[in-house]
Image: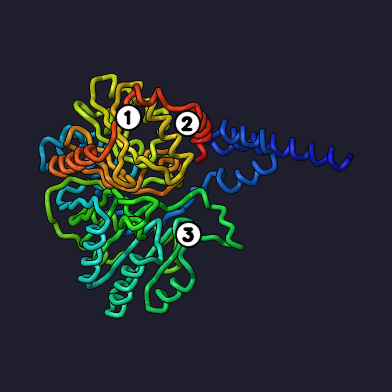
Amino acid sequence: MGILTFLLGFIIVFNILLGISIVFLERKNATATWAWLMVLLFIPVLGFVLYLIFGRTLNKKRIFTWDNKSRSEVKKVVQQQLQAIKEKRLDFFNKEMEDYASIAYLHLRNDEAVFTQDNDVQIFTDGLEKFDALLNDMEHAKNHIHLQYYILRNDELGKRISETLIKKAKEGVEVRVLYDDMGSRSINSKFLKRLRREGIQIEAFFPSRFLHINLEINYRNHRKLAIIDGEIGYIGGFNIGDEYLGKKKRFGYWRDTHLRVRGHAVQSMQTRFVLDWNHASRRDILYEERYYNPLPSGNVGMQIVSSGPDSQWEQIKNGYIKMILSAKEFICIQTPYFIPDESLLDALRIASFSGVQVRLMIPNKPDHPFVYWATLSYCGDLLDAGAEVYIYQNGFLHAKTIVVDGKIASVGTANIDVRSFRLNFEVNAFLYDMGISKKLVAAFNDDIKLSTQMTKKLYDRRTIGIRFKESISRLISPVL
């Protein structure tokens, strides 16, 4: 009896101390703090284990490092562009984009995201087309290929990619592959050993260090980038796996959005890859001009914006909010998960109440059930504010796209959820171009033809079971 009393007292004191550390030391947002305090209260021992795995704040000191030359050059350009925007002398190729100078300024301040205007952008919404283009570009690589994906599978598509990489490595092309350890947990050591044996440098981001226990499991690198010869870059939602080609019965057709970029924005994509690679690998990439070899190819304005748990600011979320608040006519959003925090939800509701047409599209099936039910709950909030909500029926919608007024847009890896904003390492392209934006709107309108509209009347008819699932999922959404 004395031992049990001692253990109970120890657990209570330990829980109190952990609760104090969460409140006063971790500096989490209030919603997440209360969620973890509830977990500690109701499941004291298991709650502590869950907190160690999923709740710890990431140590932000020097996660990413880069050489002084690259750093100083970027800071110099950023300061020049900040000053030019402040003094209203930044020369926008497209004069209509002057209205969005404050968004460019935000990303320069928050993320040192250099603004470039000489880019050519091709949009992919189909996995077969995207990977055919990527494989073709890799076949023509002469100097280096850098790939970074959250999910890398050893399936049919993974083998096509790996065989091309092996071929190019034998031709003398430098090949580096970076994957997320948790996202790509299905790949086996045999697959990795073969790639390394064939001369490919391949590394895992935040790998498990001891007996497959990964204390960074909650902080994943969700970025998808490909850079070929420093001239061509890919960014968007497709990972490397057969499901992204629509070959998995569970999901059916896979609807995503990805960009192929040529121009000086590729430099920013390369810098992002180098930073992530240098963290994961013992073989740092140092500055060489051959890695930064873009050719002016068009007139699309772009900024490549990164965010992650290593940052004080939620850069991509702030960019989304700034875009939403700039809207005068309409906002089109496609996301597989819609779990906004109060700031973004308020921005959308204010836009809708102000007469802006807010249109949200989500998938009709879950790949993560709790996230799906929480998404439906937040859709109800938008419906109350007069927004339009569409359920995509032609397979699985995985696109992460926002378009405002057919003038500016964002395409990348960040979903509209707390995980993408605060826990995952993400990267998005913010685009300042009417031509690209109108193409994205046209794709959205085509998807509406393959969707059903969720009206307020239909939403209010949902069963008690669905309402219960929504309530539970929304309650735990801050820690999903």
Q: Secondary structure at mark 3?
A: loop
Disc number for residue 466? 2
What residue is drawn where x is 33% and y is 27%? 347
Of the two numbered discs 2 and 3 on the same chain, state the one appearing first in sequence. Answer: 3
Q: Quick one: quadrant of the N terminus? A: top right
Question: Which residue does the numbered mark 1 point to in the structure image?
Answer: 454
40 up-or-down from 325: above or below: below
Residue 339 place in picture, x, y as percent: 42, 35
- Residue extending farthest to the right is 1
Residue type highlighted by circle 3: Asp
For residue 295, say whether it is visible: yes
Q: Comparing marks 1 and 3, which lies closer to the viewer?
A: 1
Question: Which residue does the numbered mark 3 point to in the structure image?
Answer: 181
What residue is drawn where x is 52% and y is 52%? 217
Residue 65 place in picture, x, y as percent: 41, 57
Q: Secondary structure at mark 1?
A: strand
Residue type highlighted by circle 2: Ile
Q: Secondary structure at mark 2?
A: helix
Lateral position of residue 8 relative to residue 33, left or right = right
Residue 242 place in picture, x, y as percent: 35, 60
Q: CA distance from mark 1 to mark 3?
A: 37 Å
Q: Nearer the viewer, residue 259 or 146?
A: 259
Lateral position of residue 230 relative to residue 66, left or right = left
Q: Nearer the viewer, residue 83 or 359?
A: 359
Residue type highlighted by circle 1: Met
What residue is drawn where x is 41% and y is 35%? 375
Check whether the beta carbons of the residues at disc 2 and disc 3 lie within 8 A of each other: no
Q: CA distance from mark 2 to mark 3?
A: 34 Å
Q: Which class describes the residues within 10 Å of circle 1: few (<14), some (14-19), or many (20+)?
A: some
Q: Which class describes the residues within 10 Å of circle 3: few (<14), some (14-19), or many (20+)?
A: many
Q: Picture quarter containing residue 301?
A: top left
Residue 252 place in picture, x, y as percent: 33, 51
